Image: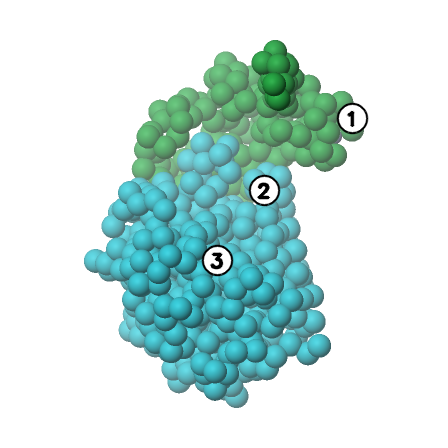
Amino acid sequence: MRDVAVIGVGHTKFGKSEKGNIELFAEAAIQAMEEAGVGKGDIEALFVGNCLGGMAEGVANIAPFLAWELNLGTIPATRFEGACASATVAFRDAYMWVASGAYDMVLAGGTERTLVMGTPFATRTFAMGSDRFESQTGLTFPGVFAMAAVLYSKVHGIPLDKLREKMAHVSIKNHKHGAINPKAQFYKKYGNLKVEDVLNSPMIAYPLTLLDCCPFSDGGTAAILCSADIARKFTDEPIYVLGTGQASGGPLGRQEDYTKFPARVASARMAFKQAGLSPKDIQVLEAHDCFTIAEIILLECCGFFDWGTAADATEEGQTDIGGVIPTNPSGGLLGKGHPVGATGVSQIYAIVEQLLGKAVKGNQVDPVPEIGMTDNLGGDGATLAHVILGRSRRKK
Amino acid sequence: MAGIEIEEAEKELMEAPKYPLTMDEYKKTLKEGKLLGLRCGACGEVTCPPMMVCQRCGSKELEKIEMSGKGELMTLTVINVPPEGFEGPYIVCLVKTAEGPWIPARLDYDISKLTPEVLGKTVELKEGLTLPGDKYSAGERVVPVFKVVE
Ligand SMILES: [Zn+2]
């Protein structure tokens, strides 16, 4: 497998948009292509993550239209769907195709529009990512993680009220960072939350309140991947893909204690193994904080903290800048927003920004990190994908 | 003339693998208050809700059984903001059945009196609740509802 580099990234403003899936992706893609200085003739394939286009806009088979939208000619173009992990899966496949030598350059990203659906129907469509027997019950996506919080409390013997206070610190931290990220949905909002604000906001699915939950969002993201051997023709500072992982999980009932999502453990280990690294080597993490409890669980599954200790670590500030593992300095899904099919490459974008020292002051990890990682989850722990990025090529 | 006889092609189709307990049959039986599962002829493991192969050993030797309807309450939530087509609030839970598998269900319980104390309690199947379907649900929904055994 050849080394692969990221040479350009693009990211629209997240939040409510009047633009559609095609328009959002096109904007992000052109930004990434301009940054890399590439266009028709350079890009050999297009991989796009999109989950709910059929529901929000009645659109299927979006990928070929995106290729023509960007005047990329007749290149193969494919949509990837792995619920919230769609764009990471698209990025990872782009990496695989370039690493294998089949293509030298691929455009990967994602796009999603959800706010136009309104809360009841958007909630319905998100629940379609659950197992068929679960969605029959009227279980929602917040409900899945609400049950995870209850289970976490039970498994680790942390009283639920205490756990809720610790979870609130995830919301406080990620909103603090989102509030100073101009691309974030909650830019200039919720930058100074208190524990009580989170606990007392409207109850969505007990024990999760509105401020425990990420919002519905619209947005597009893109990245240009190419063979590391040609990357310096396009940029002085390529960011290298050091390792990737992907794994599958089944229904919650089959996973049993899903505070230890088996697919997340497998995918993270796969990425670490490929990179020849371990959690202590990661200096910045963008991770799938769809709900406050989700960030606590993922930190343990990826090996950053022992089982049952990430809630305390979060309360102590170990997951903020200056801590053991700065997590979601972009604002994460909670502060930046979560346009489902675009989120994975938003995380890639944020890590590339961090490794280039281009995040805003207050969100930039200092000194500029050498190695960063993304963690993305789709559905109820059904699709998990991880990417490790670095400023230097993989050690042979 | 190259090719196989049409009878041979028909026989092949007849003998092709068949899903051991379809969602349709599972829902129709649940509507009558019976929860069905699949017992593995090779290892004895019970799979519920149904799947194509045994969830422990992968065997296709599965026999339909009626579950006891008894179990333990593992986790739950109260859905205040339901998906379109559902009316909240209601309790969704995961029940560890006496036969082993954890299954998604509703819990029949007074929400105003709900506390974490209810976790770990013994529950039993009360009914199969029928809910109207929508354009995306491929027919009506049938959900197992459990009650706490005092
Ligand atoms: Zn078996």
Residue closest to the eye, A322 or A60? A60
Looking at the picture, do discs 2 and 3 lie on one chain? yes
Chain ID, green in image: B
Q: Provide residue A279's location: percent of width, then percent of height.
A: 65, 71
Chain ID, cyan in image: A
Report which residue position mark 2 lands on.
Answer: A250
Helix, strand or loop for disc 1: loop
Q: Quadrant of residue A126?
A: top left
Q: Chain of mark 3?
A: A
Query: Which residue is at 42% across, 40% downward?
Result: A128
The quadrant of the image that shows the N terminus of chain A is bottom right
Q: Chain of mark 1?
A: B
Report which residue position mark 3 lands on.
Answer: A90
Q: Residues within 10 Å of mark 1 (few under 14, many from 20)?
A: some
Q: Provide residue A206's location: percent of width, then percent of height.
A: 44, 47
Disc 1 Cβ-to-ligand 1 distance below 8 Å: yes
Q: Provide residue A107's location: percent of width, then percent of height.
A: 43, 65
Q: Quadrant of residue A199?
A: bottom left
Helix, strand or loop for disc 2: loop
**Disc 2 or disc 3, which is closer to the eye?**
3
Residue B135 horizontal side relative to residue A162, left or right: left
Q: Chain of mark 2?
A: A
Q: Provide residue A171's location: percent of width, then percent of height.
A: 43, 65
Report which residue position mark 1 lands on.
Answer: B42
Q: Amino acid at mark 1?
A: Ala
Q: Amino acid at mark 3?
A: Ala
Query: Which residue is at 60% across, 52% downward?
Result: A247
Q: In the orientation shown, which residue stands out farthest toward the front?
A: B1
